[in-house]
Amino acid sequence: MGSTRTTGVPTKLTQGSQTKGGIGESTLRPDGTLKVTGEFAYSSDMWHEDMLWGQTLRSTVAHAEIVSIDTSEALAQAGVYAVLTYDDLPAAMKNYGLEIQDTPVLAHKKVRHHGEPVALVAADHPETARRAAAKIKIEYRELPLVTDEASATAPDAVLVHEGRDDEHSRHVPHPNIVHRQPIIRGDAAEAAKKADVIVKGEYTFGMQDQAFLGPESGLAVPAEDGGVDLYVATQWLHSDLEQIAPVLGLPEEKVRMTLSGVGGAFGGREDISMQIHACLLALRTGKPVKIVYNRFESFFGHVHRHPAKLYYEHGATKDGKLTHMKCRIVLDGGAYASASPAVVGNASSLSVGPYVVENVDIEAIALYTNNPPCGAMRGFGAVQACFAYEAQMDKLAAKLGMDPVEFRQLNAMEQGTLLPTGQVVDSPAPVAEILRRVKARPLPPERQWESSEGADVRQLPGGLSNTTHGEGVVRGVGYAVGIKNVGFSEGFDDYSTAKVRMEVINGEPVATVHTAMAEVGQGGVTVHAQIARTELGVTQVTIHPADTQVGSAGSSSASRQTYVTGGAVKNSCELVREKVLEIGRRKFGTYHPAWATAELLLEGGKVVTDGGEVLGDLVDVLEGESVEVEAEWRHRPTEPFDLRTGQGNGHVQYSFAAHRAVVEVDTELGLVKVIELACAQDVGKALNPLSVLGQIQGGTTQGLGVAVMEEIIVDPKTAKVKNPSFTDYLIPTILDTPTIPVDVLELADEHAPYGLRGIGEAPTLSSTPAVLAAIRNATGLELNRTPVRPEHLTGT
Amino acid sequence: MRVNFTVNGRQQEADDVWEGESLLYVLRERMGLPGSKNACEQGECGSCTVRLDGVPVCSCLVAAGQVEGREVTTVEGLADYARQREEHGGCASGACGTSLQEAQQWRANPAKGATDSQTGEVGGGNPAAALSPIQQAFIDAGAVQCGFCTPGLLIAADEMLERNPQPTDADIREALSGNLCRCTGYEKILDAVRLAAARQDRQGLQEGAV
């Protein structure tokens, strides 16, 4: 519905503008047909003759010593081929982890969270495996729980991990703090004295689940060379490989990974889930082993978004200029580190939001607790901060008697602004403009549910539950804007690899693109084919399945794949193009002087001069030849943040989105209906406009979810998860999701391929605080936590 | 136990079925039809939606034994189902079924095999011709991202359009409210159903004019 697109600075295109299906067109997904016919092979669809089913036995308590494990009864079951515990691990390396190798493949002596894997079973039927796992007897001796900052940092606190020697252990103030990042710039204390108004707030962000629909699953097939072939759904094949091979005691070349169909990811597949377990069972039994989590197990099988406590203070002058910001962000990382250090880096460096604040005093920490492990989820630390600083902006505007959008625009960052880290924002930052656009959009009509036949309850809070016909329903409007970094930050070597081949097949020039990029639904495969068409002037592009037979593509996360692997594909295509032109010069250079003198392009299957003269057909140039290049590509390097001051050029690029939410609230029952959630976002260059809209609308909806319904509830007394199901953990249905009109800006970032901007995460940031602001606007309540539940609105 | 039932017009027999197995498990693991998806296996997400004697059901909540002698349509058979409905003038009751002759002519989508299993980039034949209108509309409207919810949504949307060829947005939302999607924010799914309805409408007008 109603989507618009505005192009600002035109992106320079010298190559391929004439080739159909290139960048900038809404070409359709190459995997679309297989996905609508049910033939696309997802990781849970893998099947092998003679395969066994793996089952994981998980801890029923959150923190305990393992006194004993008795597997004898399970092993004696008919149909059971293997039962494995820690004692069966084959290599000296027993742990894995994204940043800190603190996560045991199977629990050793103790468990640190509810649902931690303790034992594995392989059997000839999944139910046999489940029943056998239930017969494993484990005796636990429960330990005191660490569940929040107070219990984690108390003088006599139990240590979640004893004897830490990771790189962060040296600078953290307590061993139950995974990582701490302060950022100091200017003098916040002094600036506070000049503020006419000061606003303080304490905010709570609930634990959100990625809730990708395709469960963790895959198939491990033992190979004759003693290695294993693994078919899985993941976000980063090579990162998995680095963690899997050592605990199997195998060299990396003996663990051959192929990406299977991925049923969504959203950060939840950055960490290892069943990969190692399936390989262990396959290598032990000598048979292919398939593991498929059900939804209950999936809630324990991956990390979640960090729940957070955020303490903020802002000051402003009476004419509405921000004077300073102090904040403390406490993220609960749960029992294992996962991506917590990087989440801390994002939360701290983006804690000011897209605003100019010269005096800041920032601290972000992630805790080790006995709660479920938390790590990557779409928005990655920036989401929690955005929820808090946007609430602060509304409070400040109210206190100053200013319009909340105008107040934001007055303080909005722009190109050239210094971040709290001292880094210059060196590409367009149209923060004020995207706010203007969402505000300028006409509001949806009031009381849309009314008709001559009475109220259409489907359009009211409570929906078909028929809880109101409009009585007690009030409307509210709220705004928010956010900033997300694109790509891996803080000095990480964030590269990707692309192998591109060009040859003639059946009388037609064909390009083949081979990367290890995880297609998780975002449409990277679509975009890679578009880039190859644009750069090589061909129509036919084959996307080779992603596997570890080509170099790393890095992760499908951090809004980075179109930038980085797209950049790698572009780069390899350019290298291929040069080789193709060399062949052309060698074969045909004597026939036309332009081969030597003109700038040559590949367009529409032909070699043409930049003046448009056709020099030859690619089929003739490539006759009897094939050209192949595999090359790595990197974006500009970044630097780590200083551990005491937080200064450093830590980020690559930024992504900005703004939302306006319109809600209707049944104040008697505390039910919320979001009527419209309009978004404006700068995407730099829309390589595939249809996919851009899909990313923005999907990200917006995940933000809506954590505003009004999504939260993993952990019992503070037991640290156990109370709602691991889609019955009790609710994600938005089509009835909960409003119309999402989108306004797309294309202001080129000159540092990025085609001027593009990573887009996947930004809409998830501002969606949540916009909905909260609208509910506050409707009800007049303060609402310092998300998600908002009915009891928060009715005070019951 | 043994279960005999019709799947996508073809008589099938599943042996050694454990009594606790769901229809979803039998389809996916015993019939080689993994198109129906296993996102929650508790009847909340709709990804396993199939038609059982024409009625949309969550196949994860149907015990395999319950389908004895009955007729099941999965996403793998949706294109054929839609084609037959068009040829035979609709079958809202699901009773249009499949004649023995038609069942014998059933074969898997020829687009398979020749197509790259990951991307489908180099397709065999003309896969577009083998799709039902709702399947084509999902591709054209950008309603497919990861695609895991897609098979269930296609079955549900096709069934709604069979009952209600000119749905309002509220009708579409109500009919698809049992199918979760985590990628799209549903906007493109709404577009796809509107598109399929519009194309169906236009085609009907053209046929009426002949």
Image (cartoon, rainbow, N blue to C red):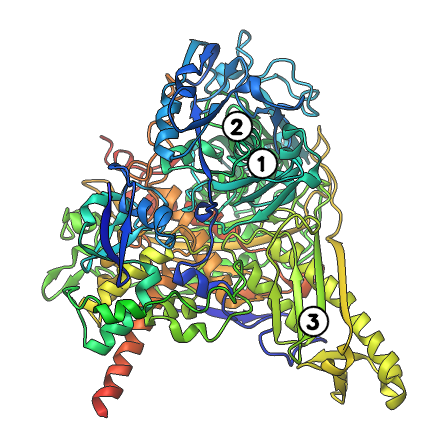
**Number of numbered discs present?**
3
The residue beneath circle 3 is A535
Residue A52 place in picture, x, y as percent: 45, 36
Q: Nearer the viewer, mark 3 or mark 1?
A: 3
* Distance from Cα at disc 1 to Cα at disc 2: 9 Å
Residue A265 place in picture, x, y as percent: 49, 46
Give whichever of A346, A527 is nearer the camera.
Answer: A527
* Distance from Cα at disc 3 to Cα at disc 1: 36 Å
Q: Secondary structure at mark 2?
A: loop
Q: Residue furthest left?
A: A453
B15 relative to A32 in the view: left or right: left
Chain letter of disc 2? A
Residue A614 place in picture, x, y as percent: 75, 88
Q: Secondary structure at mark 3?
A: helix
> Which of disc 3 and disc 2 is earlier in sequence?
2
Give whichever of A461, A378 is nearer the camera.
Answer: A378
The residue beneath circle 1 is A343
Label 2 Cα crowd, 10 Å radius (few <14 / some 14-19 / many 20+): many
Chain letter of disc 1? A
Q: Amino acid at mark 1?
A: Val
The residue beneath circle 2 is A333
